[in-house]
Image (cartoon, rainbow, N blue to C red):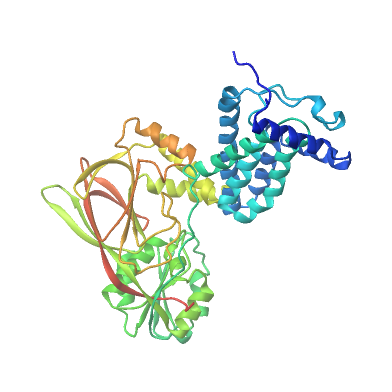
Amino acid sequence: MHTKWRPGPGRLSRLDRYLVRRVSSFPGGTYDTFFRRLSASADNGKLWMGAAAIMALFPGKTRRAAVHGLIAQAVASAVTNAVFKTLLPRARPLPEHLPVFRFVHPQPTSSSMPSGHSASAIAFAVGTGLVRPALGAALAPAAVGVAYSRVHTGAHWPSDVVFGSAIGAAAALITRKWWPVRPPFPEVARAETDAPELPGGAGLSIVVNTLGGSYKEETAAALQEVFPEAYVKTVDPDENLVDAIRATAERPGTVALGVWGGDGTVGAAAAAAVEHSLPLLVLPGGTLNHFARDTGTGSLKEAVAAATKGEAAQSDVGMVTVERGLAGNPETAELIMVNTASVGLYPNLVRRREHLQPALGKPLAGVVAMFRTFAVGTPTTLTVDGVRHKVWIAYLGRGRYYPRDHAPLVRPVLDDGVLDVRMITADEHFARLRLLWAVLTGTVATSRITHLREATEVLIESAGSPMALAVDGEALAGVRSARFRVEPRALTYYSPRR
């Protein structure tokens, strides 16, 4: 059984008593009530949970800062109360040390060393500031005020507050491993070039996929109004999309190929554009169109401006050689990849994340989607560049995606010459538990189950039954192997100058 000690004649104790006497010498005033109420508002972390709830209303970095602050606060509180208060039992200041009207009532009965209120306050402010420095600076006065209030109200000795504050700051810094601070994304850079000017759409042939998620009956008419001199080909559901795109690219007088549709449609059009040496105009349409966003034509206004002025850039493309069918008599096909390819649970993860994103924001939606997907999914056995793995996800991006962790979102450069390879493996013991724990604690990006690298060529082979491969959102079943390589600056696309 521990006996609580009171500050003795040592230097620290003398300094504690000196500082408390200085505080007790302050005349009474309204600030006594202020500090008493401020201290009470931070009981059990209520003040910081309320601040986090308000911050969570704003998606993006503000919401992420709130989560990081709460994680840091939880760690600081647990370490302070479960560890140090047990190891360092200490009596709190007595009523004779401060005026009675200033003393907190009721006085806590736990160990005075260290201050849990101070640890939580500093942890939340520093943790938030690591993600959003401006918010951390705004919270700093409140955090320091709570820390000082513990001395002002007689709840703690000054050294308790200093030690607690140090624990809080350390907890915030340590939890950067749990919730890493993402470095800023690089600036958008494009390999600018010239392409034929298309005033009014003269020489432009556009393919419109009616199966695109946002297609409406007036879509083709609206594009024809914007590009009155263009040829607009509407591909109905019963038509072969690839054949229709190829025929449109080969149409006499065509100097540029336009495409309206999702990522799979854009990929097929990119293949035709490369084959026929035509610049590609990507129009925003379809369920998902990441390439339109990456090329700077995420709105119709931007696409029209670039086409009219002949402003363009060059992009690498991924060449995917796929073997399907029987092992002794495989069928070989070559595909062009402009965005991503994946094996495993990634398509399910993306669908869930996109569904949850409007309500939760990207970061939190990604965490929830991962937990739901991996809780019920099973890993796939593959050989990647000759190394056998059990993988939850094998993902390849054509170009570096950011952030550089498990959740790629944006691609600022389209001609960097690399394949972005990311795998989440199930090779380790207790693979599912490891994965779910990493998802719950936000440590997937730094976990041993996550493998990140870059390459110019990658070979993925099925280690047993054929695998399902998704390329630019289009699924291929019965795949035995897929070889990926980069074709530098093979595609010219219209893009407004920055």
Q: Residue furthest top?
A: 1
| Relative image position of residue 105 (x, y in whole percent) | 81, 26
| Relative image position of residue 142 (x, y in whole percent) | 72, 45
| Relative image position of residue 157 (x, y in whole percent) | 70, 32
| Relative image position of residue 123 (x, y in whole percent) | 60, 41
Foreground pick, 229 / 301: 301
Q: Is residue 417 left or right of residue 179?
A: left
Vertical placement of 445 versus 14: above or below? below
- Quarter the N terminus occupies: top right
**Which residue is painted at 71% across and 31% down in the image?**
156
Give the tally of numbered discs: 0
Quadrant in the picture for residue 263: bottom left
**Which residue is painted at 33% across and 66% down in the image?**
268
**Which residue is painted at 45% across and 81% down in the image?**
307
Foreground pick, 167 / 296: 167
Q: Is residue 115 among what the camera can see? A: no
Quadrant in the picture for residue 282: bottom left
Vertical placement of 227 versus 322: above or below? below
Q: Is residue 367 among what the camera can see? A: yes
**Which residue is painted at 41% across and 35% down in the image?**
376
Foreground pick, 375 / 304: 375
Q: Is residue 17 left or right of residue 221?
A: right
Vertical placement of 71 versus 272: above or below? above
Foreground pick, 445 / 203: 445
Q: Is residue 93 left or right of residue 338?
A: right
